[in-house]
Image (tube, rainbow, N blue to C red):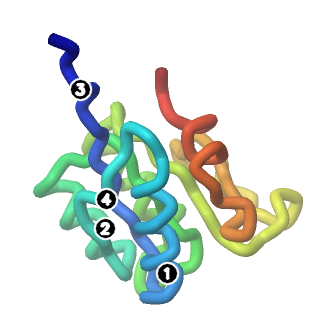
Amino acid sequence: MVEEASEMDVLVVDDQPTFRAVARTLVGLTPGLRVAAEAESGEQAVELAGRIHPPVVLMDINLPGISGIEATRLLREHDPSVTVILMSTYAAADLPADAMDSGAVGYVRKEDLTPAALTALLPD
């Protein structure tokens, strides 16, 4: 009997309901991933992650309240094993200077978000 591989929970963080729906669909199409929860602000992301401990967080950079960059720092302080993937509409060259110092494993433009792009940034 073959055991089915367990799926990793993903917390999707974006202030726009339309994009959260798109991200939810993309995560659902990515083998090995499933959406565990959604947040619409950095503060809500930190609070939810503290409760559900998702191994993967898909984090928008521009959020109301604390930014996705600051929320990523806080998440990584509380759980260094969490994989945070930043996303936004910025070109990579236009990212805020501190984006990649936040502890995120990588960055994906929202337009380029695909199951393959997500899988490429996940830990083995």
Look at mark 1 in the image and give the residue it sits on.
63
Q: Is residue 51 left or right of residue 95?
A: left
What amino acid type should be assigned to the residue bearing mark 1?
Answer: Leu
Q: CA distance from mark 1 to mark 3?
A: 36 Å
Look at mark 2 in the image and give the residue it sits on.
45
In terms of sequence position, does the residue under pointer 4 or pointer 1 come before the other? 4
What amino acid type should be assigned to the residue bearing mark 4?
Answer: Val
What amino acid type should be assigned to the residue bearing mark 3?
Answer: Glu
Q: Secondary structure at mark 3?
A: loop
In terms of sequence position, does the residue under pointer 1 or pointer 3 come before the other? 3
Look at mark 4 in the image and give the residue it sits on.
35
From the image, which quarter does the N terminus lie in? Answer: top left
The picture quadrant where one finds residue 72 is: bottom left
Look at mark 3 in the image and give the residue it sits on.
4
Contact flag, marks 2 and 3 (Cβ < 8 Å): no
Mark 2 vs mark 3: give the one in front: 3
Q: CA distance from mark 2 to mark 4?
A: 13 Å
Q: Secondary structure at mark 2?
A: helix
The furthest residue to the left: 51
Residue drawn 49% across and 88% down? 18
Mark 1 vs mark 3: give the one in front: 3
Residue drawn 15% across and 53% down? 52
